[in-house]
C-alpha cells in the first residue's frame, strides 16, 4: 500500500459541534480525525456532486407540481 502524505489541520468549532463530532465518530467506530476526513471526502467527491446535481434537476423538473400541490408561497419562511 502506498504511503500518502499527511497534513495537520487545526480548526476551532463551538463545543456543541465538537461534542457532536465525537459522538458521531464513536457511533461509527472511528476516530474524530477519520470521521472529519471522510466527511470532507464525501463533500468533495463525485458521488456527492452527482447527488446534488440530480436533486437540483429533480426540483427543476417538478417545481410546478410542488407549487400546485402545496400552493405557491405556502410553507416558505
Image (cartoon, rainbow, N blue to C red):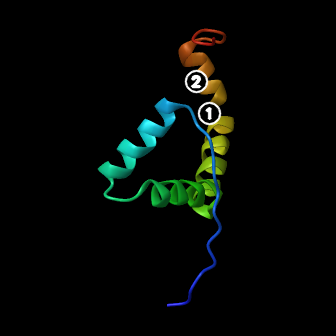
Residue 19 relative to residue 72: left or right: left
Q: Marks 2 and 1, Cα distance to the nearest angstrom? A: 6 Å
Residue at 62% from the left image edge and 33% from the top image edge:
62
Residue at 62% from the left image edge and 13% from the top image edge:
76
- What residue is pinned by disc 2? 66
Q: Label 2 crowding class (10 Å Cα cut-off): few <14, some 14-19, many 20+?
A: few
CB atoms of marks 2 and 1 within 8 Å: yes
Front-lying residue, 15 or 29: 15
Residue at 63% from the left image edge and 46% from the top image edge:
11
Q: Label 1 crowding class (10 Å Cα cut-off): few <14, some 14-19, many 20+?
A: few
Does residue 70 sit above or below 52 in this rendering?
above
Question: Which quadrant of the figure has residue 8?
Answer: bottom right
Secondary element under disc 2, as helix, strand or loop, is helix
- Residue 62 is marked as 1
Residue at 32% from the left image edge and 50% from the top image edge:
26
Secondary element under disc 1, as helix, strand or loop, is helix
- Residue 20 is marked as none
x and y percentages locating residue 10 in the rendered image: 63, 52
x and y percentages locating residue 45 in the rendered image: 62, 62
Amino acid at each position: 500500500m502506498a504511503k500518502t502524505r499527511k497534513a495537520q489541520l487545526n480548526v476551532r468549532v463551538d463545543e456543541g459541534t465538537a461534542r457532536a463530532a465525537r459522538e458521531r465518530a464513536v457511533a461509527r467506530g472511528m476516530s474524530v480525525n477519520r470521521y472529519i476526513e471522510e466527511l470532507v471526502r464525501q463533500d468533495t467527491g463525485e458521488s456527492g456532486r452527482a447527488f446534488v446535481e440530480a436533486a437540483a434537476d429533480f426540483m427543476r423538473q417538478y417545481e410546478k407540481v410542488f407549487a400546485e400541490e402545496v400552493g405557491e408561497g405556502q410553507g416558505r419562511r
